Image (tube, rainbow, N blue to C red):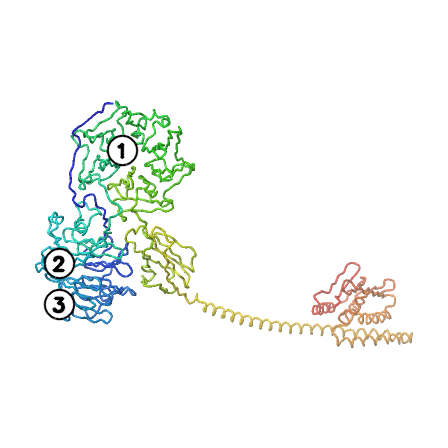
Amino acid sequence: MKNYCRLLWGWIWVFLSLGAYSQTGNIFFHDIAVRTGLNDGNVTSITQDKYGYIWIATQGGLNRFNGTTIERFTHKHGDSTSAPASIPYSITSGPDGRLWFGCDNGLYEFDFSTNKFKRHPLLQNWYIAKVVASYDQLFLICNGSLYGYNTMQQQLTDLKAKNTVIKQYPNYSLFLNGDMLYIGSRGGYTIYNIETKQAVFKPVSVLNQLAVNRIMADKSGYVWLSNFSHFKLVRFHTDDGQAEIISDHPAIKTLNKTTSYNDLICDSKNNTWITTNVSGLLQYSPATRQVNHYLNYKIKDSYSADYILNCIFSDAGERLWIGKIGGCSFFYPDKNLFSTLLPFPKNERIQASRIVRQDQHGNFWFSTGIGISCYDPIKNTYSVWRNEPNKNNVIYNNSVRGLEIGSDGRIWIASAGGVNCYDPKNKKMTFYDEKDSIPKVFYFTANKDRKGRIWFGTNRYDGLYYYSESANQFYSVRHHPLLKKFIGYPVRIVYEDSKDRIWVGYGNGLAMADEKNGVCKFWDNNDSSRNTIIGNMVIDIKEDKKGIVWVSTFNGVTGIDLEKDQYHWIDESKGLKTNITSSLAVDTANRLWIGSAAGLYMMDEKRNNLYYFDESSGLAGAEFTEHAGYQKDDIIIMPTTKGFIQFRASEFKKVESKIPFYIASVEIRSGKKWVDKGSDNHLQLNAGENSFTLYLEALNYNSPSHTWFAYKLSGFEKEWHFTKNARVVYTNIPGGNYTFHYKAAMRNEFEHVNEKQLIISIKKYFYEMLWFWALITVSVAVALYVLYRNRMNKQRHILLLETKAETLEKEKTLVQYESLKQQLNPHFLFNSLTSLRSLIKSDTKQATGFLDGLSKVYRYVLKSGEQELVTLQSELEFVRVFIELQKTRFGEGLRANITIDEDSPGRYIAPVSLQNLVENAIKHNTTDKDSPLVIDIYTDAGYIAVRNNLQKYHIVETSNKKGLAGLKTLYKYYTSKPIEITSDENYFIVKIPLL
């Protein structure tokens, strides 16, 4: 095959010396500025308190940083407990945990229990330039002298007056190392033993009597001395007196800047870090005696500190904090896990990246949307191939999405306009076209397999082409026995797994061709099953150590286990911030790394937990482009919009999930309440303050976005809440006592985190208190009792009245009835006497019997007058006598029949009641021999009935009807059974209930 060479001279070498910091910007600086909450940007001093908070002193106030937010403390007019109304030049936290502020108007201390400041009156209005702290002892440079201040006894000692060595030399700077206080003087320094009170002066000849404005002792016995006015920095060994002038180091001289060395600190590995006023940050390595320079370039990025740096501080976590003009920055002195490979020299504006490969000489080849480049890390040089206006093209198109290195070292380039091949040996660029059996179209990818084939994917024509290195020939996929069925499918990537199977990622699915066994399979997602890939736009393909093939798409990542026919989906439901995933890599520990449009993820080897990385984790950019990643051994490189992210995966160590956490404050209706962080506390809330917000905070300076919180309010809820939101809101909590449990951890890993507690007591309104309801209950009970008593008394009174009325009524009835009985005397007596008169004349014997009967009648009437009730038997005996007497008058015109059952004679009846009924029957009906009056007296179902045949007089006799009415009224008092009165054409019947 004839190689077609378009241009021999079309390659461009661009050499750029990058110095000690070229392509090594892997120390990541986190910035804190006014825009993130600082009171102002001129930082004068930094320290860390006993709880882990970082305090940043600025010219206009004090700032407390928790890793996420800043709480500002400024002076409030008229409030002596507010922050100092002056510039805090020096702040420090002592071994006893007390926090001190040296200002231009005195010494202040922070009270953690009240969140307030207090001034120490003994040093009021003193200018304090520097303060360092030991146990119960402060050492201060103030008012032109050196003082010791006993914080327990509040006693001030002038050390110049007590020590002749200190008195002999001026005091410009301080550094405390254990029991040794290093005092920067003129032409040397003094070492003062704070226990023995002995001092010795150490002259440094190379200083030439210059003032030591900053002093620091490192871990190897060297003392660092800085002079501001003559821009001098000296490293001096205390024992042998050897001095090294660091300010004359070649690496510093090459900066061509006259700078002062403002502050010094030694890290855990004995490297010295130096802040300057115009040259940024310097690092001195005693092992190599090299100086590294970290500087802010014109195009600012997070891998450089600003130029003018004031102070530097090391916290308990070995982070270094830099105070500067413009804010504060902090970083880990050790190299960051991530570094950046830039596809073009640093001064180029566009660094959006696509594909990277490394050749056999260690050179990196980069493809981008604006050309390709080759970076030589040894020479720190770039070679760039890019089409320029009005010049011959050096490649088909500047937009290159595919890049591969052949077995012979040639560079294969898949661009938006066709396929090129560059030979580094003869520096020739070849342009291929249809004459070479490959069209000039837009290509997505170039990938190599172990059979010596270079695969090229496009969305035009046949979709997939490959170049055979052995045959030196291009072929269309139509010549492939298995993949030809997918002719025309848009190809985005080709990958060969450990079993020599070819995986092809399309824009509309995924194919696998097993050439050994002649098997081909295709997957796509049509929302009908989960046993397929999660999305159809395939970006990258990688195989892990267990043979599971992972496929990234715009809808997430799919793990395909062909042996078990299982599919593992990773998307937003599993913790991704976005489903748009791209670069994949599997490290030597079988952990899966996933680049996405919103950061980098690592899934552990058990595929249980996701770890997230973004800019706060040290990434130069968190937006990974839609291209495959590259891996060589344990080095992983992935493209982003800000260059290629490079890291050694084995260097990633799981960060301990335990981090300090507290309750920052509690917000209620009346304002915010401060919660003491020293121990478990009791929060008292008034009645009505039952809606409140708790603000949690965790001191996660490295990765605040990875912080998770867990909490629950015992007494109100049973389940824990797990969230990344530090704001906890409760509303309408009933009054009572509760316990708020809370935790904080990295990445939702709370297994080994001990909880903290806050007791919350909410007072109840008086009407919610038990005593109130007890009082109400008693009051209601008393009221009900009184009401009940009154009601019962009224009822008894009414009942008494009713009884009296009933008694009166009964007495009235009895009187009326008695009166009715008494009516028997005149009528009956008159009639009886008339009958007796006739009998005496006609029949003396009968007259005698009549008289006996009459006496019995009146004897019964007189006797029953004393009784309310009589037996039916006695009443019937009386009625029989009465009827016999009446028969004397009426003869055969009156008949009477008495029929009583055996059980009735012993029952009771009102006296004379039957007699009245019999007399009424005689009174109102005719008695005639031919038509006799028949009176029947009989018992009937608990009644005694009196029935007579109706044969009324033709002349109506006037009747007051009081007899029956009175009898009926009387019986109402004896029984609920009524007297029944019935009549028809033949009979008149009255039934009286037996009692």
Residue 525 in the image, given as x and y percentages of width and height: 39, 35
Secondary structure under the numbered disc 1 in the rendered image = strand
Q: Which numbered disc, 2 or 1, marks the residue that appears first in the sequence?
A: 2
Q: Nearer the viewer, mark 2 or mark 1?
A: 2
Is residue 393 visible in the rendered structure shown here? no
Q: Is residue 258 left or right of residue 71?
A: left
Residue 533 in the image, given as x and y percentages of width and height: 38, 37
Location of residue 661 by image quarter: bottom left
* Quadrant position of the C terminus in the picture: bottom right
At 30% from the left and 25% from the top, the residue drawn is 475
Amino acid type, residue under disc 1 in the picture: Gly
Where does label 1 land, which residue?
402
Secondary structure under the numbered disc 3 in the rendered image = helix
* Direction left: furthest residue: 208
State the residue in front, 377 or 830. 377
Where does label 3 land, which residue?
165
State the residue in front, 495 or 880. 495
